[in-house]
Amino acid sequence: MEMFDITGKCPFFQKFAFRKSLLWKGILSNYCEGASAKYCERKRLYHRDGSSPCADVLPTGKPASKAFLSLP
């Protein structure tokens, strides 16, 4: 099954797309728009279940830590 782009429907992308930290920019660039998009666990779950996990779940499928969430 081909997995299409879901960034417009993804709570993670909508919540964190405008963060300033290089770490956030790297994750969004790689998993949401780049070469690692095919490995995005959020996208896989969306295609399997028809819904996305909560926004604080990273593209790896793991919950983001409080320290990570506190980055600008």
Image (tube, helix red, strand yellow):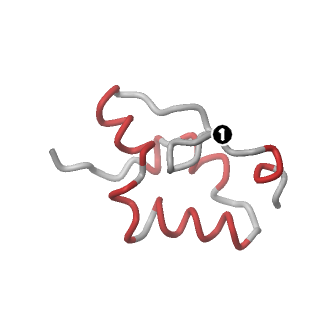
Q: Residue at x 52, y 32 (%)?
A: 53
Per the image, the residue denoted by label 1 is 56
Residue 72 horizontal/vertical position (percent): 82, 61
Amino acid on which disc 1 is placed: Asp
Q: Residue at x 69, y 60 (%)?
A: 18
State how many labels appear. 1
Residue 22 horizontal/vertical position (percent): 71, 73
Category of crowding for the residue at label 1, using alpha-carbon neighbours closer than 10 angstroms: few (below 14), some (14–19), many (at least 20) = some
Q: Which quadrant holds the N terminus?
A: top left
Q: Residue furthest left?
A: 1
Residue 50 horizontal/vertical position (percent): 35, 28
Between 19 and 23, which is closer to the camera in this rendering?
23
Residue 10 horizontal/vertical position (percent): 50, 43
Is residue 18 left or right of 1 when viewed as pictured? Answer: right
At mark 1, the secondary structure is loop
Is residue 68 left or right of 13 when viewed as pictured? Answer: right
Is residue 70 left or right of 56 when viewed as pictured? Answer: right
Q: Residue at x 58, y 64 (%)?
A: 27
Q: Residue at x 33, y 58 (%)?
A: 38
Is residue 19 left or right of 8 when viewed as pictured? Answer: right
Name the quadrant containing residue 17.
bottom right
